[in-house]
Image (tube, rainbow, N blue to C red):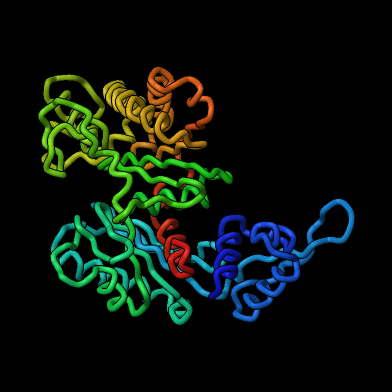
Amino acid sequence: MEKNGRRIVARLIEKGGATLPELADYLSVSIGTATKEITALQQEGLVRDTGKIETGSGRKPRLYSLEPDAGYYGGIDLNDKYVSLGLMDMAGNMVRERTNVAYKLENTPAALHTLCDIVRALMGRIPQYLPRIRRFCVNIPGRINRITGYSYTNFNFTDRPLAEIFSEQFGHPASISNDTHAMTYAEYLKGCGNGERDFIYVNVNWGLGSGLILGGRPYFGKSGYSGEFGHIHAFDNGILCRCGKKGCLETEVSGQALRRKILERIRRGESSILSERVLSSDIPLTLEEITDAVRREDPLCIEVIEEIGSLLGVQIASMINIFNPETLVVGGELAATGDYLLQPLKTAVNKHVLNQVSQDTVIRIARLGENAGVIGGCLMARSIDFGLL
């Protein structure tokens, strides 16, 4: 596909549809040239004419959009407990989702083998789509080089690119992405994004990460490792982070920090609706149980989540001072606590950010929730397929 064709596809991905005058203006070409480009894409079966639109007066222009049945894209999202798979059509509509299939993410050949078995089993439930699947994208926590196809945190025990192994196992081209990068892309295109050019997503999950959209394009960094927000040095607490260093932001601001603090305080004798659960069972306390306790207005859990919100807000203020984004979105499992996390976060941001800069940025809770990862995987697969990422 020629450069202008890819640019049209990119525009239709971003906007959903466009008229010939809009595309000509976007490409800086004549309407005649834009017409030739659209015609070529229609002949390839990628674009369709969706009819005339009302403009108030004058000749009604025709609207063009991506052809939904031209192909399908799979998104596979991993975390420490589940694997989810979704399927999206060319136009960006989710047509199938299978979320939260039990899975334990470990850096072992056995865990990789199990993952491939699960995905193939899920694919077996959608045989009607398999011939038209163009690409998969697998979201994995940790450091991912999307270009080379290597993962350096999970499944890093083989000399072969992980993306190559997935392509072989799934029978379709496959790419890999950092999980937070995919969630960022999903929120930008399908969630809280509203045409902004500069957009930050903060993923407060078991760990802590971030994703950047700068100038309307995802920013991955030279090797794909951008957004390691949780591993900036923020505390002299002596706590060893899972990255091997001490004092990382993640050691005090993350799901693992939330659980550690609540367990410590309950074991010191503080009261919580989780006290009996913690003191009478060896089964690890889950983040779902904690966020549910917050929603049930447990004072201890609310106090700890508010403390984490305040600590996070101090660091987010620095991000806003550096990047001056239009929108900053907070997502991940801890975002399910809503204003209990967001209000102290905003208070800390207002205290530490430059006044003029703070006026430019809107802070929101993520809209897509737990579906962000699988939607983002599908969107990443589509954009990679057209060479847009």
In this rendered view, identify the residue nearer to me: 286 or 193: 193
Q: Quadrant of residue 3?
A: bottom right
Q: Quadrant of residue 127?
A: bottom left
Farthest residue to the front: give it: 29
Residue 381: image location, x then y, percent: 42, 65
Residue 131: image location, x then y, percent: 45, 82
Residue 197: image location, x then y, percent: 53, 44
In this rendered view, identify the residue nearer to me: 150 or 271: 150
Q: Give the answer, above or below, for where 249 lies relative to 18.
A: above
252 displayed left or right of 322: left
Tell me the residue at 45%/47% (across/down). 213
Farthest residue to the top: give it: 351
8 displayed left or right of 326: right
Residue 49: image location, x then y, percent: 71, 70
Tell me the residue at 48%/25% (across/down). 358
Q: Residue 170: in sight, yes or no?
A: yes
Q: Residue 298: in sight, yes or no?
A: no
Q: Quadrant of residue 84?
A: bottom left
Tell me the residue at 56%/75% (across/down). 70
Quadrant for the C terminus in the image: bottom left
In this rendered view, identify the residue nearer to me: 302 or 344: 344
Tell me the residue at 70%/62% (across/down). 24
Q: Give the answer, above or below, for where 372 lies relative to 33.
A: above
Q: In this figure, what is the number of numbered marks?
A: 0
